[in-house]
Image (cartoon, helix red, strand yellow):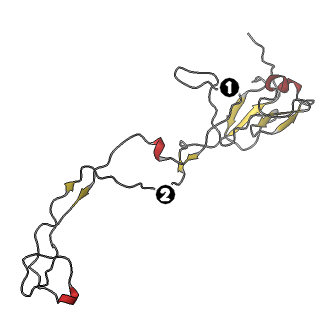
Amino acid sequence: MEVFIGTIQPFAFSFAPRNWALCNGQIMSIAQNTAMFSLLGTTYGGNGQSTFGLPDLQGRMPIGMGQGPGLPDYTIGEASGSPSTVLTSNQMPSHTHAVQVQVGGASSNPAVAPSATNQFLGASNSSGPLAAAIWSDELSSPINMGGAQAGLAGGGQPMDIMNPYLALNFSIAILGLFPSRN
């Protein structure tokens, strides 16, 4: 089967077959590949005088050129994207978090007053048992705090945004049929 010059095809082996080249962005000689240069030009690199570049699909996913409904316009040879990103709080949609606290329920036995030189919150400086408890040994049911705000969480580390993948060898036909325009 003969293919068109410039056909890109994935292969399950690690080398480019005869008359094919790896799609790894390599720079090619125009003089030795005039037909291929007439199709690609400098879309993928090179100086256009003596060299031109092949597409680089290492770690990249090809997408169709043009503009689909509701999508950006992609030009042939355009490369963009990143395998990870750092999400900022400005990129997150507005949202709220409920804040719950538990307060003391049942109180302890009344405390004995300390000496005047060793006073603490909840105790008077009079002698004898106090009417106020100092601590609680049971918690009440959780209650919602209406206007409370939770602080920021997270460490600002990059997160992976790559889809699951399988690495294959993408190669481009450098010899074959010259494609004619309709």
Image position of 64 with respect to 88: above or below: above
Q: Residue at x 64, y 24 (%)?
A: 65
Q: Residue at x 8, y 88 (%)?
A: 127
Q: Quadrant of residue 23?
A: top right
Residue, disc 1: 75
Q: How many labels were placed on the picture?
A: 2
Task: State the residue lying farthest toward the top.
Answer: 182
The first of marks 1 and 2 along the sequence is: 1
* Residue 56 shown left or right of residue 161 in the figure: right
Residue, disc 2: 155
**What amino acid is at disc 2?**
Gly
Q: Residue at x 18, y 88 (%)?
A: 116
Q: Quadrant of residue 107?
A: bottom left
* Residue 182 shown left or right of residue 164 in the figure: right
Q: Nearer the viewer, residue 2 or 125?
A: 125
Q: Is the N terminus in the top left, top right, bottom left or bottom right quadrant?
A: top right
**What amino acid is at disc 1?**
Thr
Q: Residue 45: image x %, image y %?
A: 80, 34
Q: Residue 58: image x %, image y %?
A: 69, 42
Secondary element type, mark 1: loop
Q: Nearer the viewer, residue 110 or 98?
A: 110
Secondary element type, mark 2: loop
Image position of 28 with respect to 161: above or below: above
Q: Nearer the viewer, residue 116 or 93?
A: 116
Image position of 172 with respect to 120: above or below: above
